Image (spheres, helix red, strand yellow):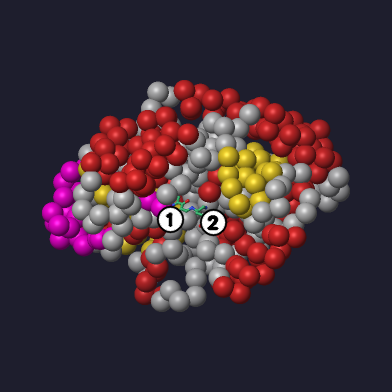
Amino acid sequence: MSDARARALRERAERALPGGVNSPVRAFRAVQGTPPAISRGEGAFLFDEDGNRFIDYVLAYGPHILGHNPPEVVAALRTQLERGVAFGSTVALEVELAERIVDAVPSIEMVRFVNSGTEATMSALRVARAATRRDLIVKFAGAYHGHADALLADAGSGVATLSIPGSEGVPARATADTVVLPYNDIAALTELFELRGGEVAAVIVEPVAGNMGCVPPVPGFLQRMRDLTQRYGTILVFDEVMTGFRVAYGGAQELYGVRPDVTCLGKVIGGGIPVGAYGGGRALMELVAPSGPVYQAGTLAGSPLAMAAGCAVLDALHDGAAYERLETLGSRLERGLAAAADDAGVDCAINRVGSMLTPFLGVSEVIDFESARAASTATFATLHSAWLGRGILWPPSQFETGFISTAHAEADIDRTVTCFLDVLSSQTDLPGSG
Ligand code: KE4
């Protein structure tokens, strides 16, 4: 597979952009090889500048649940493009998407659109601190909620991949009110609340963790969190930027039957156009300017293009058929990878929720960041490179989640499994399952 044009573009990119990218994970620093220079996407596939085709499990890190350039999204964007892209004034599409989200997400009565997941979580915490007049925030090790200072403490995703605890440039006082607990550790959460419950403004959680790889909540974890936050007057924030409209039309809160006070959204609701949102009960959301004293703003918030794409995606997901298809494909991939690991005689924990999946190599169970970090990142890098060489693009980090779209086919899944078996069968240094 030629990568001449990719290398040439990379050299120019590294001169013009830090690391040659606009987001760290794209630089492939946690794996081997040169990131492909993508020129276009179509359905389940990406094509690079040299014409090579890749089955895409990155899907722009989540937005493309229908695959690349689904016709209904392209049509909606084309229509809006003809009308204009930004007006600095409310347009009908902002109300249209807001009403769809209110109808879909059990805990949302009112929503505010922003331009990224980072802005959504940052704003949600500001509302929580205003509502409770408290400062303490609780998050979980390995979780990533965007790059706002207060949340860059033991963050997962890019920071975890780069093994940088927190980040340079974040003053200690910015994270002094952030408590980081182990994910899925009910005892630690209970102890924190028994000790400091009255000080906690908010608990923010990925209801299905996706930024340490895919790590589902253990039974009772989310409900216990809801009970404790209820009892101590703490705002419960579900960061559903990744899981929203991905694991169910009503998100993880519908799937697990636990209602947060505030929900953060992104990715899928913009169909690949920059977007974020946070929403909750009317009393809380009326605290947000100009209705209330919590300031938050954004020049291009509620971008008509993002609203148009988001409405088209949600309308395509609304009847639920997509989730049945995603479950069929996700289950096929999970079973295939598990069987391949068994055949190869190596330990492999495969965590999946719907169309979110991560294989953790060399370990048999992953329930939190500590157990995720026990996985063999070296073998993951070997696997990633082998998949890439066979035209399969998986997220370039053990601590990211692979995504499946409704545009993927059984043949794509089977090809991915076959290559996985080839790679694992040639590994001699992985712990065996037998
Ligand atoms: P953005 O600011 O990148 O739009 O969203 C931040 C964010 C917030 N919450 C969750 C649960 C998220 O997963 C994210 C961003 N996800 C990463 C993928 N692990 C984006 C990929 C990247 O950083 O390039």
**Is 286 situated left or right of 400 in this image?**
left
Residue type of the residue flagged with mark 1: His
The residue pinned by badge 1 equals 145
The residue pinned by badge 2 equals 157
Label 1: few (<14), some (14–19) or many (≥20) C-alpha neighbours in 10 Å:
many
Name the element at disc 1: loop
Query: What is the tally of numbered marks visible in this picture?
Result: 2
Q: Earlier in the sequence, mark 1 or mark 2?
A: 1
The residue located at (43%, 33%) in the rendering is: 72
Q: Magenta region, mostly helix, strand or loop?
A: loop
Q: Position of residue 204 (x, y in %)?
A: 37, 52
Question: In this view of the protein, which residue sits in the foreground, 87 or 105?
Answer: 87
Q: Position of residue 14 (x, y in %)?
A: 62, 71
Is residue 114 highlighted in magenta?
Answer: no
Residue lying at the far left of the rendered structure: 291
Stretch in magenta:
274-298
Q: CB under 8 Å between callouts 1 and 2?
A: no
Question: In this view of the protein, which residue sits in the foreground, 265 or 376?
Answer: 265
The residue located at (62%, 40%) in the rendering is: 45
Is residue 293 highlighted in magenta?
Answer: yes
Q: Position of residue 234 (x, y in %)?
A: 27, 51
Q: Decide: is 432 above or below 160.
A: above
Q: Is mark 2 within 8 Å of ligand 1?
A: yes
Q: Quadrant of residue 243?
A: top left
The span from disc 1 to disc 2 (Cα, nearest Å) is 9 Å
Q: Is mark 1 within 8 Å of ligand 1?
A: yes
